[in-house]
Amino acid sequence: MALTNFAGTVAVITGGASGIGLATAKALHTKGAHVVLADINAPGLLQAKDQILQQDPTVAGQVLTIPTDVTIESQVSELMQQASVTFGRIDLVVTCAGIGNGGPIDTFTASEMQTMMNINFMGAYHCVQAALPTMRQQQSGHFVFLSSVAGKLGVPLLSAYCASKWAVRGFSSALRVELYGTGIGITTVYPAWVDTPMIHQEADVAQLMSIEVLLTPDQVAFEILQAVIEDRSDLTLAPNPEISFILQVYKDDPDKAEIMAGKSYRERVIRFTQQQAAQRSQQ
C-alpha cells in the first residue's frame, strides 16, 4: 500500500544532519511527519533539528535526534527501537548515510574499501534488519535506499563507491521480491551529482571525473517524496545529458557503454597529463 499522506507518519532518516537526509527531513516535517534524525555527527544533528523546527514552528510533527553509527548493528537497533517506542510505529526509513571518497584503485586501500562498504551498504542492511519487525507487525511501511547513478554505471576513480552502490541496488531488488505482498514498499534512488559535501573531491580527481553538479538536495528530497507517494521502485535522477546518455547505452548495450566510458576517461587522463606537463615546463 502506497504511503500517500505523510501527516502523522513516523520517518527515520540516517545521514540526517546534512545533504539529502536533512533536505528530506525538512520536506517530510512540513507535511506533518514525525521525524527521527540519525547521524554520527551529534552536534550536526542538533543544528539540523533547529533548522527543521524553525522553518515552520506551527507544524505539529515532532523531531527526535539520535546519534547513530550505522556501521554498528546495536546502535541501529537502538535507533529503531527508540523510534518505535516513542511514536508507536515506523512508516518510512530513508537511508542517506554514506561516504563517497574516490581515487585510483592502485592507491585505494583495503581499509578504505571496507569502510565504504560498511557505511554505504551495511548501514542500509542494518536499518532493514532493525525496522522490518515493526513494519511486519504493522503490515505496512516503506524503505528508501540511496544508491547512485554509480549503482548503474561503471565510474572510473569510484570503484569502491560503485561497488557499494551496486550492492545497495542488488539488495533492494532482492528485498523487493522477498517482501512482495507484505504491504512494505521499497524505492531505490539513483541520483547523479548532487550539491552535497560528498562531491567535493580533490581538484585533480574532480577534473578527471568531469563532475558537473546539476541537482540540489531539496530537488532530490522532493522527488523522493513523490516516488514514495507513487510507490515507485526506481527513482533515477540524471539531468546531466552525458550521464543520461550513457545510462541509456548501459541499458541497451553494457559492453558498448563500458568501452565508451573507458575511452572518454582515457582521453581526460591524457589531456590532464599534458596540462600538468605544460604547467611544470612554465615554472
Image (cartoon, grey):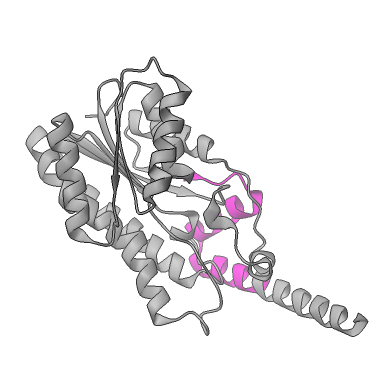
Q: Quadrant of residue 25?
A: top left
- In the image, residue 208 above or below residue 231: below
- In the image, residue 82 above or below residue 160: above
Q: Is residue 268 visible?
A: yes
Query: What main secondary structure does the magenta stretch of the protein show?
Result: helix
- Residue 91 is situated, as x and y percent measured from the top left of the image, at 22, 33
Residue depicted at x 39% and y 14%:
58
Residue at the left extreme of this rendering: 137
Look at the image and tell me in which quarter the C terminus lies: bottom right
The tally of labels here is 0
Residue depicted at x 21% and y 29%:
1
- In the image, residue 156 above or below residue 145: below
262 in the magenta segment: yes
- Residue 259 is situated, as x and y percent measured from the top left of the image, at 59, 72
Residue depicted at x 65% and y 49%:
241
- Residue 99 is situated, as x and y percent measured from the top left of the image, at 44, 60
* Residue 262 falls left or right of residue 186: right
Q: Is residue 178 visible?
A: no
102 in the magenta segment: no
- Residue 94 is situated, as x and y percent measured from the top left of the image, at 33, 43
Q: Nearer the viewer, residue 260 or 49?
A: 49
Q: Provide the residue span drawn in magenta.
A: 236-263
